[in-house]
Amino acid sequence: MPSPTPQKTASSRPTLRDIARDAGVAVTTASVVVRGDLSVVIRPETRQRILDAAQRLGYRRNLAASSLRSGKSNFIGLLVQALDVPMTLLKLREIDHAILARGYRALLRNTDGDPELEAQYLHEFADHLVAGLVLIQGGSAATSAGLVPLQERGVPILTLEPLPGGEVDCITVDRRFGAALAIRHLLELGHRRFVFLHGDLRTDLVRQRLAGYRETLTAGGIPVKHQLLWPADGQGFADGYRAASALLANGCQATAWFCNNDEVAIGAMRAIQEAGRRIPQDLSVVGFDDIPVAAYAPVPLTTIAQPVSDIAAATTERLFARISGKAVAGQPLMRRLEPRLMVRSSTGMAPVPDYIRHQTEAF
Amino acid sequence: MPSPTPQKTASSRPTLRDIARDAGVAVTTASVVVRGDLSVVIRPETRQRILDAAQRLGYRRNLAASSLRSGKSNFIGLLVQALDVPMTLLKLREIDHAILARGYRALLRNTDGDPELEAQYLHEFADHLVAGLVLIQGGSAATSAGLVPLQERGVPILTLEPLPGGEVDCITVDRRFGAALAIRHLLELGHRRFVFLHGDLRTDLVRQRLAGYRETLTAGGIPVKHQLLWPADGQGFADGYRAASALLANGCQATAWFCNNDEVAIGAMRAIQEAGRRIPQDLSVVGFDDIPVAAYAPVPLTTIAQPVSDIAAATTERLFARISGKAVAGQPLMRRLEPRLMVRSSTGMAPVPDYIRHQTEAF
DNA sequence: GTGAAAGCGCTAACAC
DNA sequence: GTGTTAGCGCTTTCAC
């Protein structure tokens, strides 16, 4: 196939130089336009000529060359410890959209809970010259050590769960307030005997909820012996099921169940129903998070809804402020956004205790 | 802080040259070792010296420079159309592990069903010099057009669902065989009246299942009028619920329900139970996929289990064979791996029809 | 606004 | 195995 124009072999892709030559401008100018650098003023007609040439020749920027020269990429690192957690997916999705809208791209890494892999991925984020990093599910003490190389490079880091020992901006949900919302709701329904199906008490996430649970109950005049605690091994449906089964087998008298998250609550509800108790006539259950299936559980679940959109918006806003150097921030940020109570069908009036019902029948 | 060694400003990270100098070898050798290139024989002690130097100086390969020079990256593009589908997450996870084990890294992109975004991402995969691409959820006719630039660059592409009009290797599940497994199971339980809660009949995925449904029923002597079809609008829990509710409201007599996937089946089971029918005493339900919640539905679901591990293994094996140039493949590959029947509690013996029960009572 | 020129760090080609 | 060299395509600096 003879080439009509005197070009060098058309085998490889066009470069910036080809565009510049075609548009009759300097490479510099072409670079500025192609990059969308608005700090340099370019005559609109010139800009258009360059864009046309790029379009016509099918130009695509060589990202490797760009990164090599500039020392930056348009990646935002996104680290998760388990991808199949519904709440994680919700946050991930919103953050991904926001990143995309700003012209950046997500680089997602899932450690599946492996600390060595986490350390490796953190190194690789630096290798990829990420412009920022978001820890979707927080991390451990080991995590914050792994962040140091990135911090030294000046990469803005944000976490969505408090990070032990990390000097890192954190935008999260106010779990203490959320627990208070849940408990207040149950108190208003007349409940007097409570149980909290909690998660790992060593984590800040769970302790926050515990604080809200305790203080709201105490303020509501509930004696501590009716503020039961019961552990769920993990955070999945099966864990809630097992924990609730064990709790019922122990003859628990609580009528108000507050669960660490929606998965546990849904698992617990199944155990409760299998034990022949009715929800919400005999027992009320409240979850935490408001994941999509919560509305679709066999009994639609009353829960504490995380403000996912607000969290994602605040996260990306802060992140890009730091990327563009606006927020230099002496002190790491800590914001706890308020969740909302979402009332569905799993909560109802406290059942009338037997001795009162007998009185009533006596009338 | 005075520097004891006569180096140039220690501000920036060490380069290959620094490593080579420190180890007393040529940059070439250092490059070979650092890259793990096994095609060049290096004396073990030399190799160790280089690795030690790299370790000591905290060397990290500059990926941008490497990609620019070599024209390749170690990225494998992974494209999904909806990230929050349980089956997608399962496959994604296994493939991610396999990619990692081979020294490559995933570059995940979620289009959320937006065709323009899909086209953009496909271009960007090329920009990132991906070594391969996996379409986790298949794609549309528009998708295959977007693949052309990648195909021209010789990037191996694999899809996990048949791609309309695409000349692309496909490794998927044999849905026709799966449907046959489900129906055979129901026939053996004595069922004579069937309904298939199907998805979009324009897709190959659904037509495969339909074929298996039809032919197995016909071979089993079931008249076509007892081979009902009923559409579910989508593929989620709510779609199954709505479809089943409507079906029951229409007075459907089928006792054997075959559902397009597990989400639809679980939604349908809820509608069935709300209508006062018992599973499996009155109705049997079979799903498709075997997602984690299937075992954990209110009635544990009998379903057709996709061989996820096999699919992921076959996918990566084929992909890396093509990357290393082993499989040049004239013809696109099409493999349909066999699913397995997973019997749980949602299927049981067909209920005895009233007229037979009356006869029995007469004895 | 333009044009020339340097060079980011690496890989690959080559002669030794 | 070594050492030299060229250059991937881009961004940036600087003089104009």
Image: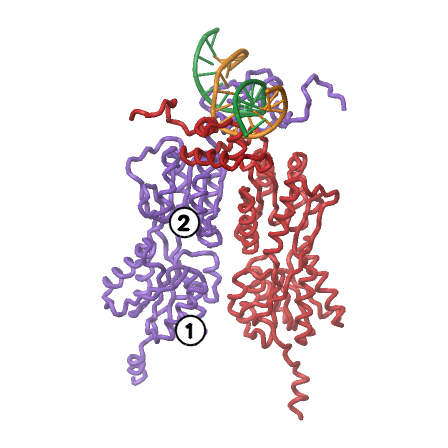
Chain colours: A purple, B red, C orange, D green
The quarter of the picture where residue A342 lies is bottom left
Closer-to-camera residue (B21/B225)? B21
Q: Are marks 1 and 2 on the same chain?
A: yes
The structure residue drawn at horizontal position 63% and vertical position 45%, both measured from the top left corner, is B319
Q: Which residue is mark 1?
A: A278
**Residue B316, position in %: x, y?**
61, 48
Mark 2 lies on residue: A137
Which secondary structure, mark 1?
loop
User: From what the image shows, is residue B300 above or below residue A154?
Assistant: below
Residue at position x 63%, y 77% from top?
Answer: B349
What is the chain letter for disc 1? A
In the foreground, A116 or B353: A116
Choose mark 1 or mark 2, whichever is in front. 2
Dot 1 alpha-carbon crowd within 10 angstroms: few under 14, some 14 to 19, many 20 or more: some
Q: Position of residue B336 (x, y in %)?
A: 68, 55
Chain letter, disc 2 residue? A
Say whether residue A13 is left or right of residue A196.
Answer: right
The residue that appears at 31% across and 66% down in the rendered structure is A229
Task: Identify the mark at residue A133; answer none if there is no mark.
Answer: none
